[in-house]
């Protein structure tokens, strides 16, 4: 899809981004909510995308029925 001279499409994670999202998601499942994480990549490596993908995945850990954070493995 082209818009204003730019091609738009799906943004797929690079290997290091996929790795950090999987590791942090696994840690959140094992240790619960309320943790703080530091995502360190070099400049221009996609930290914002990594954080966005992680946030999207963390939403799946939210149990809508109980309206509380429920982590199920």
Image (cartoon, rainbow, N blue to C red):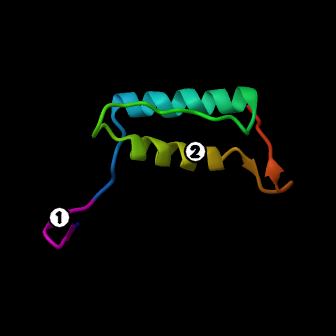
Which residue: 67% across, 32% down? Answer: 28
32 shown above or below 58: above
Which residue: 36% across, 29% down? Answer: 15
Which residue: 78% across, 56% down? Answer: 64
Cα separation, mark 1 vs mark 2, equals 28 Å
Comparing 51 with 14, the one in front is 51
Is 43 left, or right, of 16 in this rendering? Answer: left
11 shown above or below 35: below
**Residue furthest bottom as drawn:** 4
Disc 2 residue crowd, few under 14, some 14–19, many 20+, Cα 10 Å:
some
Q: Is-magenta flag for residue 70? A: no
Which residue: 86% across, 54% down? Answer: 66
Q: Position of residue 68 (x, y in %)?
A: 82, 51
Comparing 22 with 51, the one in front is 51
Q: Quadrant of the N terminus?
A: bottom left
Comparing 19 with 37, the one in front is 37
**Residue furthest right as drawn:** 66
Q: Position of residue 55 (x, y in %)?
A: 56, 47
Disc 1 residue crowd, few under 14, some 14–19, many 20+, Cα 10 Å:
few
Comparing 36 with 70, the one in front is 36
Q: Which residue is mark 2?
A: 57
Q: Position of residue 48 (x, y in %)?
A: 41, 46
Is 38 left, or right, of 18 in this rendering? Answer: right
- Give SS at disc 2: helix
- Give the total number of marks visible in the rendering: 2
Q: Which residue is mark 1?
A: 6
Q: Position of residue 19 (x, y in %)?
A: 45, 27
Marks 1 and 2, the one that precedes in the sequence: 1
Q: Quadrant of the C terminus?
A: top right
Residue bounds of the magenta highlight:
2-8
């Amino acid at each position: 899809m082209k818009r204003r001279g730019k091609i738009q499409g799906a943004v797929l994670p690079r290997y290091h981004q996929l790795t950090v999202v999987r590791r942090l998601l696994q840690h959140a499942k094992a240790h619960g909510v309320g943790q703080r994480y530091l995502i360190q990549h070099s400049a221009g490596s996609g930290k914002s995308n990594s954080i966005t993908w992680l946030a999207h995945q963390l939403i799946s850990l939210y149990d809508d029925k109980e309206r509380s954070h429920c982590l199920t493995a």
